[in-house]
Image: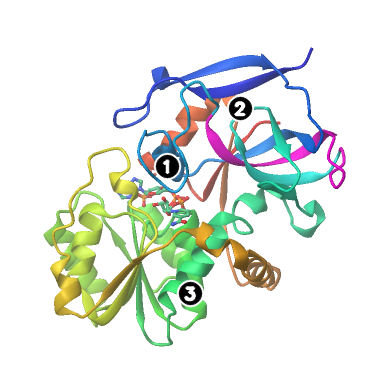
Amino acid sequence: MTLNRRFTLVARPDGLPKPSDFALVDEPVPELADGQFLVRNHYVSLDPAIRGWLDDAPSYLPPIELGDAVRVSTVGQVEASKAGSIKAGDWVMGLNKLEHYSVAAEGGFTYPIDANAVPSVTNYLSVMGAVGLTAFFGVNDVLKPKAGETFLISGAAGAVGSIAGQLGKLAGARVVGIAGGPEKCARLLNDYGFDAAVDYRGKTVDQLSAAIGEAAPNGVDMVFENVGGTVLDATLLHLNREARVGLCGLISEYNSEHYGTRNLWQLIVKSARIQGFLVSDYLHRFPEGGAAMAKLVAEGKLRFDEHIEEGIDNALPTFLKLFEGKNEGKLILKLV
Ligand code: NDP
């Protein structure tokens, strides 16, 4: 009998997730009902959002239940099918679980992909997936950069941030990135073509504010915020009049109490606006965003990096890299 190895949640993490919060279990692969198909998950997307789903707190998706495998996006191949439109051997992607085999239903959140349309199927978890679309809609719908404006991005060397910055450059903005450490800052300038880079590591709000002031001497017209905490606080001090802040993520606050942003008053005195957004708000526009990203990739106008680690046994240490700044590009776990 084939067994399904699953990475399950057994306790809700308090702070940074630890090994005792999870258990690897082997279970029989479930039987398929009519309309269902079995996916052999090849690649798993490890995203900061997973940290929120581990908590028992209201969010845009229900908390992962204790005892269940951790919810993740995957790319895989259909092993068996009782669904008319899906056949064994098809490549699919979707919201599944961190396990070797997932059962999906026709018409649900797992759908076929064209593996021949991309250099690697992993691209559907990076530039051609939610990461690329988050950057695309965050930049082009929420922020709408104009030529000559200054565009500041935090978490800039990461999966979403590095693409968002390049989209800002393509729109003609002057792009300034904030990232952790000199190597990542060098990558912003050399690999992703940013105009300036700021290292936030080890800096107080005042020190970071001074560094942002040097990198963006004319102030900031748009912010693509991925980090929150002291990074957002320092950034708010540099907003120009009627600046736009797109709130994509607050990764510095995912393993702790929320920081409590102190400089929100800057939004008032600069008549600025802040707007949170979810990539899933744009589900109905995914074909448009996907086509635009595919065109940019085909034209060689976007650089994207993928950081691939291996093995379900390695799931937690790999996931934690997101919070240690140790991922260089979209973090993906290879299962097959
Ligand atoms: P990344 O590839 O950017 O990886 C996370 C990075 O965050 C790390 O490499 C690290 O970079 C930085 N980081 C981690 N902890 C801290 C900290 N305490 N302070 C400052 N920086 C930190 O991940 P993603 O591109 O997948 O996600 C980036 C952001 O986008 C996240 O906030 C995520 O929640 C959000 N997101 C939002 C979506 C939406 O629909 N709104 C969809 C997808 C992602 P460094 O070394 O520079 O510190």
Which residue does the image show at 58% across and 15% down from the upper left? 25
Identity, as a three-letter code, of the amino acid under mark 2: Gly
Kindly tell me whether mark 1's CB lies below 8 Å from ligand 1. yes
* Residue 313 shows in this picture: no
The quarter in which the N terminus is drawn is: top right
Q: Earlier in the sequence, mark 3 or mark 2?
A: 3
User: In the picture provided, is 238 more to the left or to the right than 75?
Assistant: left
**Which of pointers 3 and 2 indicates the residue nearer the eye?**
3
Which residue does the image show at 17% across and 70% down from the upper left? 237
User: In the picture provided, is 184 more to the left or to the right than 131?
Assistant: left
Q: Nearer the viewer, residue 167 or 266?
A: 266
> What mark, if any, has residue 141 been given in the picture?
3
Q: CA distance from mark 1 to mark 2?
A: 17 Å
Which residue does the image show at 28% across and 78% down from the upper left? 243
Instruction: Magenta stretch: give its range.
Output: 70-88
Identity, as a three-letter code, of the amino acid under mark 3: Asp
> What mark, if any, has residue 322 been given in the picture?
1
> What mark, if any, has residue 20 been given in the picture?
none
Q: Earlier in the sequence, mark 3 or mark 1?
A: 3
Position of residue 132 relative to residue 113, above or below, is: below
Residue neighbourhood size for the residue with mark 1, other residues' Cα within 10 Å, grouped as few (<14), some (14–19), many (≥20)? some
Element at badge 1? helix
Residue 284: where, in percent of width, then height?
61, 65
Identity, as a three-letter code, of the amino acid under mark 1: Leu
Determine which residue is flagged by label 2. Answer: 311
Q: Are marks 3 and 2 in contact (CB under 8 Å)?
A: no
Kindly tell me whether mark 2's CB lies below 8 Å from ligand 1. no
